[in-house]
Amino acid sequence: MPKIALSEAVLAKLKPPAEGRLDLTDAKVPGLTLRVTPSGAASWCLRYRPKGGKPERLTIGPLAAIPLHEARKRAKRLIGEIADGQSPQAIRRAASGALSFEAMADRYLGEYAKPNKSSWKNDEGYLRRARAAWKGRTAESITRSDVVALLEMIRTTAPVSANRTRSVLVTLFNWAVESGLVEISPASGVRARAKEAPRERVLTPDEIEAFWDLTAPEGGMDPNVAAALRCILLSGQRPAEIAGLMHSEIRNLDDPTNARIELPAQRMKGRRPHVVPLAPIAAGLIDVGLARNLGSEAVFASAFASRVTLARHSLSQALRRKGLSYTPHDLRRTCLTGLASLGIPREDRLAVAAHAPSDIHGAHYDRYERLKEKRAALEAWEARLREIVKPDETL
């Protein structure tokens, strides 16, 4: 098998073969090979021969998750283990042979998802069907056919959920491969099961007025859920961030010029702390929430004894029960679109939304919070909402 000097430039120009498999062996690290299939899926492996044994092939992981320098580092470590008389292949088999899929999913959630993803509970939810379908099976026994069959079953009733489940399974199995729990990922190269169009739903002024009536005390909705939904529309924050608001995250409610939410990095999608100024109506809703849930750590407490704060899906369910076609995230989009219609500069809208700047300078060096600009933007949006819903003194 010919050896080539692999580089990032070479990999960037790589084209899949028309048929069969293309194996590229690195000239720098003995045995390190990149295998490319006609579908474009590319994964690293190490080819080696144990002392007195037959040639073996050990999967390292997908090119999409493991860059060249990391693949070389892992291959060198494995070569060292082999030189010491160890068999990485046997070690992996022994470690994973008794590991159930359920146990592997638990490890993924605890060791990877919770420390790295603010949305880890979504992963936990999307894994429920996989756990049920593969209950009692070892992680190593799950095949590509199993993954496809599960996703097709989900797709028949919930196409978007099938896509989300696929994404979680790809991440889980890639992590398992990198952690040495399984040899290959059965989810690698599995395509999305449904085409998705990005949502563009924005509430009209008439819908905003109707929404405000539905979330009024006489609207029959749980008061904590209703207040949280209103806060999403008023502040433009993500539903999970508002649903999970804690007393410790609220500052200076008694000072209209300085009332704000301080969200810690671990609660943010981008893992950066975020400050949200509170205009008067939003501050009032939170103040009422704190009084309503006196003794609780939550601003908007859950009705379930097993939870402290509202669950994100409780907000979606409340809107569905009312027969509404929009979602909590559409309320966030309505706020941010409303800011644009009011002429709020893009930089200030991005700051309100906690969207990190795409340029290197903005993302890494510009740490200015734009607190003054965000407050002015959200106060302007509240003024616009007052015109739409014509609130009285009970707002």
Image (cartoon, grey):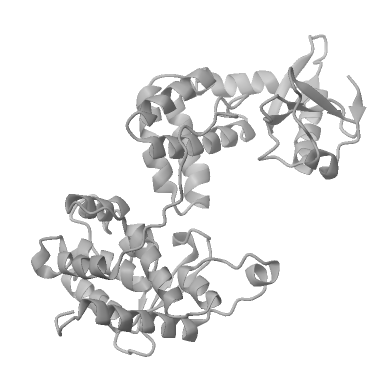
| Displayed quadrant of residue 5 | top right
**Left/right of residue 150 with respect to residue 175 in the rendered view:** left
**Left/right of residue 264 with respect to residue 187 in the rendered view:** left
Q: Is residue 356 above or below residue 37?
A: below
Q: The C terminus appears in which quarter of the rendering?
A: bottom left
Nearer to the camera, 395 or 305: 395
Residue at left offset 14%, top offset 60%: 221
Count of numbered circles on the image: 0
Rendered location of residue 83, percent (x, y):
83, 24
Q: Is residue 295 visible?
A: no
Residue at left offset 24%, top offset 75%: 285
Nearer to the camera, 123 or 165: 165
Rendered location of residue 36, percent (x, y):
73, 27
Q: The N terminus appears in which quarter of the rendering?
A: top right
Q: Is residue 257 above or below residue 215?
A: below
Rendered location of residue 15, percent (x, y):
77, 32
| Displayed quadrant of residue 256 | bottom left
Nearer to the camera, 335 or 217: 335
**Left/right of residue 6 with respect to residue 233 in the rendered view:** right
**Left/right of residue 9 with respect to residue 337 in the rendered view:** right
Rendered location of residue 315, percent (x, y):
26, 56
Q: Is residue 312 above or below residue 380?
A: above
Q: Is residue 187 visible?
A: yes
Nearer to the camera, 99 or 266: 266
Residue at left offset 40%, top offset 22%: 134
